[in-house]
Image: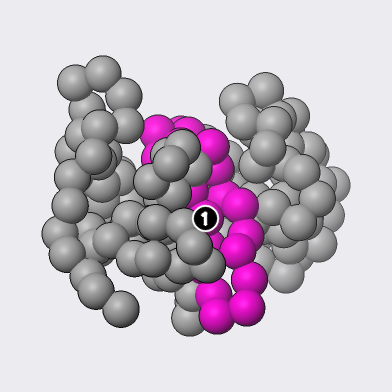
Amino acid sequence: MAYRIVSITLRKKKNIMENVQELENKLQNLLGQEFISLTFRKDITEKDFQREIYYIIGNDYEAEVGIKKSNGEVYSLSETDVVFINSSLTMLIDFIDAFSRKIDFYEEYNEVKRQTDTKELSNQFESIDKNAMKEGAWWKFILEQTENGIL
């Protein structure tokens, strides 16, 4: 597998490296460059995975986090699975920011507050990126685990 550093335009006047640097800055301020299972890297690499090209921007446990070259969508890529995360890196940044402001893992949560907070996040996320809240999507799983007190 060949890797090389790349840069692509995700939206007007914002290339992928600027978005990753913005994300790393937010994560450093919020959770020390780590969000739940996601970690991010500065060196973006290109990877051919299941006949698609992805720009690898980090890791999700043992999987890699990649942006699909053809459409800018963000996925968790394991040896056996491709799991949708968000429709764009910008949306991922927005979701992480919203989640981090709403959920405090160091705070003692009672069941009602945890369920209320995750329901509010679910509604907010649904309005931002419907695909991220579909069954089998990464964020759907994260919110279910949060609501059930697993995270």
* Apparent side of residue 112 relative to residue 87 in the rendered image (left or right): right
Residue drawn at (25%, 32%), measured in percent from left and top?
9
Q: Quadrant of the N terminus?
A: bottom left
What residue sits 24% from the left and 74% below the top?
Answer: 2
Give the camera-side residue of 71 and 43: 71
Task: Read off the residue under disc 1.
Answer: 75
Q: Is residue 95 left or right of residue 133?
A: left
* Residue 130 magenta: no
**Image x and y of residue 128, in percent:** 60, 25
Locate the C terminus and report the quarter of the image it occupies. Answer: bottom right
Where is residue 20? Give x, y as percent: 26, 46
Look at the image and tell me whether residue 22 can be seen: no
Quick check: 30 left or right of 76? left
Q: Amino acid at mark 1?
A: Tyr
Q: Residue furthest right?
A: 112
SS type, badge 1: strand
Residue plotted at (46% across, 67% down): 49
Specify the segment rendered in magenta.
Answer: 74-96
Who is closer to the viewer here, 19 or 71?
A: 71
